[in-house]
Image: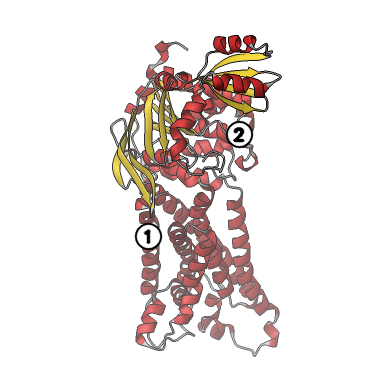
């Protein structure tokens, strides 16, 4: 269990994390979402005690992580796959970490097998691909068989098979009763993985709720996609009937009218319809809408 | 996977006693798992031994071209003892060992490895203390190997003209020990600068300025600057290897004082390196 209470971190004039309070519970996967630069990585570093909070506190299983002499059996973490010395082999890297934490050497072979790096264990990490480094980072997190696991953008650089494997792994770890906290800036990555969400923007908490509740916000907004050979005529017709119409290269996105009504109106004017699809708002859209006001590095288009 | 297998992860938490010995073992593994480590030590050893043996060889080779001096006088002037460790050998040793010390810390910062290290062992000062201990142990052994090999090589060469001295000759053992311990002292100074500056270039520059340049800033002409001079590691090495003859300082000091300077730098550097990581964000 991770408990953040009014957690605040200031770097000079920049307020990276602002009075963040949330709880991450065991037995489920909690997604940690926010746009780039929203303070996710800072928060994870605060949890691990690598950075000291300016105010507030965060504890893991009731204790500040920095107060533990050894960490791997309490929290396993993958912060950045690049946080390794490229001159060592994966085997040597893990063996040294295990030794410092009094973890038996046999555990190193176990986690290497678990992440599929057994054959690469004697090669130097500097020659690894990003995906292999991610796997090594996951192996490091698993090394101490810890009850709490943190992953910062773990899907970066993984192939589709790797993504599928990681998702399965997170669910299994949660099912085993562990606390699994996974950060991402993409809702689509969390959609099929997380049970709970903690959403932040500009260092502030935006939402902390179950994925179901979060999805509830999204599905209230319905729209209908319509394709027709004469979009101009149909647009005039539907706008007159009170709908809002957006034309994207001939594909009309209609809100305010149901599909049945659109079909009836078009038939009355003998306008052919080639495609008619009802769409519910995606989680991605709900996430974007929620964080729209707090995007740190917005492009002209999304601003 | 069924829920019946839930117990092990939580059970693991109960029994983990933190032992410093584990950290020593971990740092030992980390040191030797880098391919560059044995090379750095090997090349430094060859250079240092080469300078000293080379000088002794020159003396023997051109012996007949020098003004004749009876072996007893040559030995009596303390020259064979001074030849145990050439000044260039000490300079090379000081530069290389300072660099090894800097890299032992900055190697972790440069790669981000330090975050992985401190996330695995939140007791940061213990990590740094283990690092310093392993570094000091390895460089002490290294220093003695280089120093003894230099001693036996130079004196074996000088023996060809009957001017070699045994280890129990006055000042010989002191020169061997003084040269050997220069290695860990410089390595720990590098360790401290590496930990504080967290950058290889600036760390090495600062270390070399302190070890090699500072002695030039403080002459032995005045009492105050002689005190500062004598408080530096390289003058301490000179004091320990001069065999008490040719460099008469206006403010003489004892070999015990020079060894104390070594010890003070080692303790200070270790303390600075260990404490520097406690409060800073990593």
Residue that appears at 46% across and 44% down: B115
Percent from the top left, x then y, of residue A233? 65, 21
The answer for which chain carries disc 2 is A
| Label 2 neighbour load within 10 Å: few <14, some 14-19, many 20+ | some
State the residue in front, A264 or A289: A264
| Label 1 neighbour load within 10 Å: few <14, some 14-19, many 20+ | some
Above or below B21: residue A167: above
Residue that appears at 55% across and 71% down: B91
Q: In this view, does B201 lie to the left or right of B9?
A: right
Q: Is residue A74 visible?
A: no
State the residue in front, B220 or A47: A47
Q: In this view, does B155 lie to the left or right of A23?
A: right
* Residue lying furthest bottom: B67
Disc 2 secondary structure class: loop
Percent from the top left, x then y, of residue B196? 43, 59
Residue that appears at 51% across and 27% down: A284
For marks 1 and 2, give the CA distance: 39 Å
Is the image coloured rainbow, by chain, by secondary structure, or in one colour?
A: secondary structure
Above or below B281: residue A232: above
Asked which quadrant contains residue A299, the reply is: top right
User: What residue would you read off at disc 1?
Assistant: B272
Which is more foreground, mark 1 or mark 2? Answer: 2
Disc 1 secondary structure class: helix
Percent from the top left, x then y, of residue A10? 36, 49
Q: Do labels 1 and 2 share a chain?
A: no
State the residue in front, B142 or A14: A14
The answer for which chain carries disc 1 is B
Percent from the top left, x then y, of residue A295? 47, 40
Q: Is residue B235 visible?
A: yes
User: What residue would you read off at disc 2?
Assistant: A157
């Amino acid at each position: 269990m991770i408990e953040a209470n009014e957690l605040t971190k200031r770097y000079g004039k920049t307020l990276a994390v602002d009075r963040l309070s949330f709880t991450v519970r065991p037995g489920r996967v909690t997604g940690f979402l926010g746009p780039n630069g929203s303070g996710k990585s800072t928060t994870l570093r605060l949890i691990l005690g690598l950075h000291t909070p300016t105010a507030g506190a965060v504890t893991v299983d009731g204790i500040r992580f920095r107060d533990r002499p050894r960490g791997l059996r309490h929290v396993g973490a993958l912060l950045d796959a690049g946080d390794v010395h490229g001159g060592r082999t994966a085997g040597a890297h893990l063996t040294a970490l295990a030794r410092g934490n009094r973890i038996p050497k046999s555990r190193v072979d176990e986690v290497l097998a678990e992440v599929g790096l057994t054959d690469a264990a004697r090669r130097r990490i500097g020659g690894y691909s990003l995906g292999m480094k991610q796997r090594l980072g996951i192996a490091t997190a698993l090394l101490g068989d810890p009850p709490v696991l943190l992953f910062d953008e773990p899907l970066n650089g993984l192939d589709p098979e790797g993504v599928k494997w990681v998702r399965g792994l997170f669910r299994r770890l949660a099912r085993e009763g562990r606390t699994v906290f996974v950060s991402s800036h993409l809702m689509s990555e969390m959609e099929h993985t997380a049970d709970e969400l903690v959403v932040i923007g500009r260092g502030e908490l935006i939402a902390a709720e179950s994925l179901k509740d979060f999805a509830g916000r999204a599905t209230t907004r319905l729209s209908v996609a319509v394709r027709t050979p004469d979009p101009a005529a149909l647009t005039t017709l539907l706008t007159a009937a009170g709908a809002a119409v957006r034309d994207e290269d001939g594909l009309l996105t209609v809100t305010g009218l149901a599909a049945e009504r659109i079909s009836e109106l078009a038939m009355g004017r003998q306008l052919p319809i080639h495609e008619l699809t009802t769409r519910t708002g995606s989680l991605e859209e709900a996430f974007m809408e929620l964080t729209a006001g707090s995007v740190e590095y917005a492009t002209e288009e999304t601003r | 996977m069924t829920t019946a297998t839930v117990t092990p992860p939580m059970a693991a938490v109960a029994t983990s006693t933190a032992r410093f010995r584990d950290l020593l073992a971990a740092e030992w593994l980390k040191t030797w798992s880098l391919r560059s480590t044995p090379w750095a030590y090997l090349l430094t050893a060859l250079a240092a031994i080469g300078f000293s043996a080379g000088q002794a060889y020159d003396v023997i080779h051109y012996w007949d071209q020098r003004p004749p001096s009876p072996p007893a006088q040559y030995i009596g002037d303390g020259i064979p003892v001074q030849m145990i460790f050439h000044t260039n050998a000490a300079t090379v040793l000081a530069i290389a060992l300072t660099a090894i010390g800097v890299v032992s810390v900055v190697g972790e910062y440069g790669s981000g490895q330090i975050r992985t290290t401190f996330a695995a062992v939140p007791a940061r000062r213990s990590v740094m203390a283990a690092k310093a201990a392993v570094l000091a142990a390895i460089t002490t052994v290294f220093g003695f190997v280089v120093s003894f090999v230099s001693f036996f090589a130079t004196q074996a060469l000088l023996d060809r003209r009957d001017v070699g001295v045994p280890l129990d000759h006055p000042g010989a053992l002191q020169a061997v020990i003084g040269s050997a311990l220069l290695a860990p002292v410089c390595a720990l100074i590098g360790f401290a600068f590496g930990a504080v500056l967290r950058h290889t270039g600036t760390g090495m520059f600062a270390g070399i300025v302190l070890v090699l340049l500072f002695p030039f800033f403080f002459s032995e002409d005045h009492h105050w600057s002689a005190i500062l001079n004598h408080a530096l590691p390289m003058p301490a090495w000179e004091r320990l290897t001069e065999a008490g003859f040719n460099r008469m300082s206006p403010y003489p000091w004892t070999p015990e004082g020079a060894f104390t300077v070594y010890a003070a730098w080692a303790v200070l550097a270790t303390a600075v390196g260990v404490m520097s990581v406690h409060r800073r964000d990593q």
